[in-house]
Amino acid sequence: MSWINSFYVLCSVCQVTSQQFDTYTYFLEDLDHDFMTAYGFKGNDSWYPNSTITKPCAAFLKSYAEHTSVFTKCLVENARPFRLCETCVKPFKKAITVFEDMNDESNPCFKRLLGADRVQVIRLLNNNMQSMWKMADCKNCFSSVTEDPNNGTVNVTVSNSTEEFQQLFHTLGKCMNDTIENPDENGPTNVTVCTKCRVDYRSLNKHFESIQDATMNHACMDVVDMMNYTRLIWSDRYNCTHRKGDDGPVLGVAIVICLLPIVFYVCHRVYGNRYPKQIVQRKKKNASTCRITVWKYSQFLQHRFQKF
């Protein structure tokens, strides 16, 4: 029994807790399993006393790999034109849900899958997905995105502003397509499009600006991309011009400011008080007064010199 006592002494010196010991045991089992699999050995469940835990961890990895691969494929396919948010929301939500389940500290697979190495591949992949989703402001496309815990169905509800924008977008597109397919004989196609579809374009542009104001210039990237391409086609392809707002008040204020100096001087000229010019004449002293002044000054000087 001496070896047993030595083992207990060693554990007390190293201060190995039961939780740390279990984690280390799981790590050895995973390492043994990976080594066996890599070299083609096929063991049975009796070789792995904790195989009931190992199988759920492998199921987590498999499920996360499937959902992330579907999301990545969807992301690349919808990069241009940009339709990431509405098209890829379901695989994104499923992948995030699986990661949140793994990231729960009460989950036995938490340390084995998310804390077993320095690279942290799963965390890194999740952070990249979250960063891309946040950069595109995809959450502003939806009013709610939920997943049924029983059957895993993702329920998506598009926000009212996004839905209205899509309706206006399709209305404008239909107007453009119908005008191109049935051109007006009285004028060129671009002039006809600008004339017939101007109201639809202004409605779409006005609603987009309201979305930008409501989200503080963080509208969903799907909506932003659709509006950018619409403006590009409207201005470059069809040569249509669209003034934002009314320039009448601005021009009126500019004219009033320019006319103010003219009005001021005219009013001053007409209604201003006129004062007659007064010429101040210099008073001339006569010769006698000058002589008296000179005599008094000479007497004063003589009086002063006599004192010295």
Image (tube, rainbow, N blue to C red):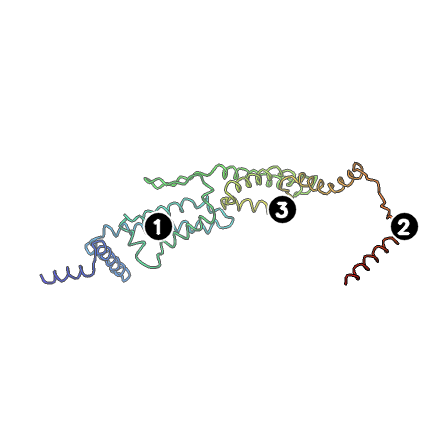
Q: Give the label, 2 or 1, closer to the camera.
A: 2
Residue at image point 13% right, 62% down: 6
Foreground mark, 3 or 2? 2
Q: Nearer the viewer, residue 35 or 118?
A: 118
Secondary structure at badge 3 equals helix
Q: Which residue is tagged 2?
A: 286
In the rendered structure, the answer to whether residue 205 lies left or right of residue 89 reads right
Of all residues, the one furthest to the left in this rendering is: 1
Residue situated furthest right in the rendering: 287
CB under 8 Å between discs 2 and 1: no
Which residue position holds label 3? 235
| Secondary structure of the residue carrying numbered label 2 | loop
The earlier-in-sequence mark between 3 and 2 is 3
33 sits left or right of 217 in the view? left
Q: Position of residue 197 (x, y in %)?
A: 62, 38
Residue 85 is situated, as x and y percent measured from the top left of the image, at: 46, 45
Q: Which residue is mark 1?
A: 64
Q: Amino acid at mark 1?
A: Tyr
Where residue 87 sits in the image (x, y, percent)? 45, 45
For the C terminus, the image quarter is: bottom right
The residue shown at (58%, 37%) is 203
Q: CA distance from mark 3 to mark 2?
A: 91 Å
- Pick whichever of labels 2 and 1 is earlier in the sequence: 1
Secondary structure category for the residue under label 1: helix
* Quadrant of the rendered image containing residue 261: top right
